[in-house]
Image: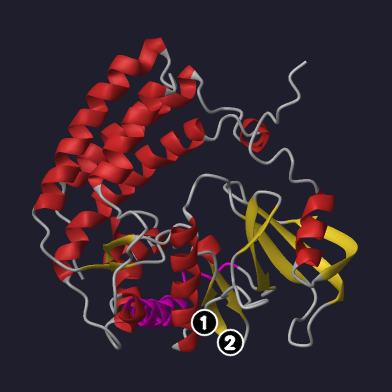
Amino acid sequence: MNDAPRHAYEPLTPDVMLDALAHIGLVGDGRIMALSSYENRVVQCHLDHAPDDVVSPVVAKFYRPQRWSDAAIQEEHDFAWALADAEVPMVAPLRLQGATCHQFQGFRFSVSPRKGGRRPELDDWEVLEWIGRLMARLHNVGAVQPFAHRPALSPTTFGQASKDALIQLNALPMDVETAWLAVYEQAMAHITAAWAGFEGQHIRLHGDCHPGNILWTPGHGPHFVDLDDARSGPSVQDLWMLLSGDRAQQTSALSAVLEGYEQLRPFDRRELRLIEPLRTLRMIHYSAWLARRWDDPAFTVNFPWFGTSDYWHGQVGLLQDQIEAMEKPPLTV
């Protein structure tokens, strides 16, 4: 029998996690709870012993092997600390034994303080305005210097590379492959045209700023978590995921966000034409992400519908809807 691990995380047992924390001076009391994360393994750990400046419980993040280089992970941590040092509410990894990134039995991991909160109420104008101000502060820090080791968000990295991965992994069923590839090419023509016509600034971004990565605490407002997908791109990438509903609802939400954002940072209205192309790229990238991770049992359990003909026929329809959306005038505020 082949005793080799079936997937990257199989050797990462709770005991290994606790041993990894003990290796850097954080002795757990045995209580460990998995937190919601598919890309990495993230757990909350209660501690029996820790340095005086570490408050129990803590959150440990074990990075997916071979996804990021050491330098790219360090850029994530450095960006988080640049934000924290600028008093932008951001959960940054703890500096322990002189480092923020640690290694144990082949796994790289970081430890962060536990910060609670709930999803923000995105139908509240004041909440959206507050988030807009916070986003502007994040982007002011992000614009100071570029990433050197993290890939940029682009039609190539999120579009072409995603299609190539789907083909290489044989993820497209034969009965829908031709239809999906045809609508993909149509969508990419719109995306690349919009991208080529944009001459604005690309800065360091949160990169995955959906409402689940903005936690709201009463009396303190929002704070950011999870810079795992931080990369360079246009500012609007961190804004459009706050918009939902029909065109009127999205316009209203965008007005509230920009009302706050422009109090602290100018916003280039030309970026609004990138909203639907960026939404389309995220859809394509999401399918490729699921295909790339299909050897991880966490994905087969939580996304059982992926890979079926019904899923891919649905994706064809969604991409057709996105083509129509990209053909319409962009949102205006």
- The residue nearer to you, when weighing 94 against 166, is 94
- The residue nearer to you, when weighing 111 against 211, is 111
Residue placed at 57% from the left, 45% from the top? 65
Place residue 168 in its image quadrant: top left
Report the residue marked by disc 2: 220
The reply to whether residue 186 is in sight is yes
| Residue extent of the magenta highlight | 119-139
Instruction: Assess whether residue 122 is covered by the magenta stretch.
Output: yes
Residue placed at 29% from the left, 39% from the top? 159
**Quadrant, the C terminus:** bottom left
- The residue nearer to you, when weighing 303 against 230, is 230
| Badge 2: residue crowd in 10 Å (few <14, some 14–19, many ≥20) | few
Q: Which residue in the rendered view is the most extreme toward the top?
A: 175
64 horizontally vs 209: left or right: right
Q: Residue type at mark 1: give it.
A: Pro
Q: Give the number of marks.
A: 2
116 horizontally vs 121: left or right: right
* Label 2 – label 1 distance at C-alpha: 10 Å
Place residue 246 in its image quadrant: bottom left
| Badge 1: residue crowd in 10 Å (few <14, some 14–19, many ≥20) | some
> Does residue 96 lie above or below 14 as drawn?
below
Mark 2 or mark 1, earlier in chain: 1
26 horizontally vs 280: left or right: right
Report the residue marked by disc 1: 89
> Does residue 47 lie above or below 265 as drawn?
above
**Quadrant, the N terminus:** top right
Q: Nearer the viewer, mark 2 or mark 1?
A: 1
Identify the secondary structure beneath mark 2. loop
- The spot of residue 67 in percent (x, y) is 49, 46
Instruction: Assess whether residue 102 is covered by the magenta stretch.
Output: no
> Does residue 171 lie above or below 174 as drawn?
below
